Image (cartoon, rainbow, N blue to C red):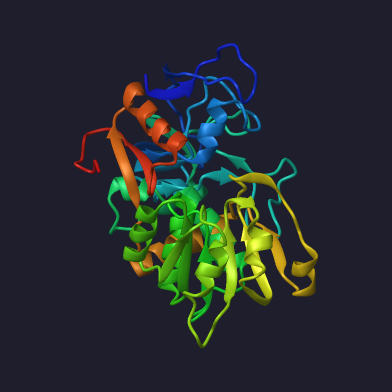
Amino acid sequence: MPSAIAIKQVPGKPGQVWYPLEEITIPEPKPSETQVVVTITAAALNHRDLFIRQHLYPGTAFGVPLLADGVGIVSSTGSSPSAKKWLNKRVVLNPGLGWKESPDGPEHAKGYAIMGGTNLNPAGTLADVVLMEAEELEECPEHLSDAEAAAFPLVGLTAWRAFFTKSNNAKEGRNILVTGIGGGVALMVLQFAVAQGCNVYVTSGTEEKIDKAKKLGAKGGVNYKEDKWEKKLQMLLPKDRPWVDAIVDGAGGDVVSKGSRLLKAGGVISVYGMTVSPKMDFLMGAVLRNIEVKGSTMGSRKEFADMVEFVRKTKLKPVVSRSVHGLDIEAINGLFEDMKKASQFGKLVVTLGKDNGSKL
């Protein structure tokens, strides 16, 4: 029987509990006509997995394999031509269901159902095998290792929508500020924007992460823990374009009050998360300067396909902070500790199956 890692129920209130990991057996998947079985070769963590272990995520469930990011080989298929064409191909998995192509949001009445650890979607990638609809697969870009391929589906999709769809500034020569560099989404925004010819600036709580961002193409960065960091950032901007065109933000907090002093009139703040604070003040100064704040969450199936093709075309390589091998609970707990401490720079990955030398 195939194995997977899920959370085990123990007493505790949401936000105070920390659910332990356990190895479970899952049924041998039997694909329907339009389905395929993917033998997973690597999977990756996201912040939602941290929230699931604290029961702070909608639909948190026990006995459901964790994780939404995955890459693998299609090992068996249903009888339809649309399924059979995938046999033996290396694929990346669309991390959610219910959103086909609408620019506004999920078309499905129940909303968007992300894989991993909830009762909204029975699949999860921290498992030997996953049963998927064939239409939810994309061929894996050939230049990526398994660890790199597992590192980009969910964060890449989130970054793609926040930057390309929402910011209106994915254009050569634009000045883009990416906050909280080091996390998976922020790094993908940085890489996307650099590939588009933008001038990218970053914020971080450590100089080390700023230096690493510069090596990935950032023009400069500032420490957001320092007083009046926005003035220091302003001094880094080009003299012929001394403003920020758009901010892609995953922190919340004071991003409007600080950011509106940097943005051009009519500039955009594209917000995909609020790790610092679940509330933001929208000040009159931002109103008078026509600043737009846009929420952005995940993305559609069409945006996922566009994003994967962009990664393939540009030969972009997602950043992997660290990886471990196998369904080793102690090792996987170590990755969760990295995320708790926010010590990672890039994605935290679990490689599976035969050890292919992709440990980092």
User: Residue drawn 33% across and 26% down?
Assistant: 327
User: Residue drawn 41% across and 42% down?
Assistant: 70
Front residue of 173 and 203: 203
User: Residue drawn 72% across and 70% down?
Assistant: 291
Report if residue 22 is visible in the image: yes
> Whole-percent x and y of residue 247?
58, 65
Position of residue 352 relative to residue 92, above or below, is: above
> Whole-percent x and y of residue 166?
63, 65
262 relative position to 76: left or right: right
Q: Quadrant of residue 218?
A: bottom left
Furthest-left residue in this view: 357
Front residue of 306 and 280: 280
Furthest-bottom residue in this view: 240
Q: Give the quarter of the figure containing the C terminus.
A: top left
> Whole-percent x and y of residue 145?
27, 50
Furthest-top residue in this view: 11
Position of residue 170 relative to residue 42, above or below, is: below
Front residue of 72 and 320: 320
177 relative position to 317: left or right: right
Front residue of 289 and 246: 289
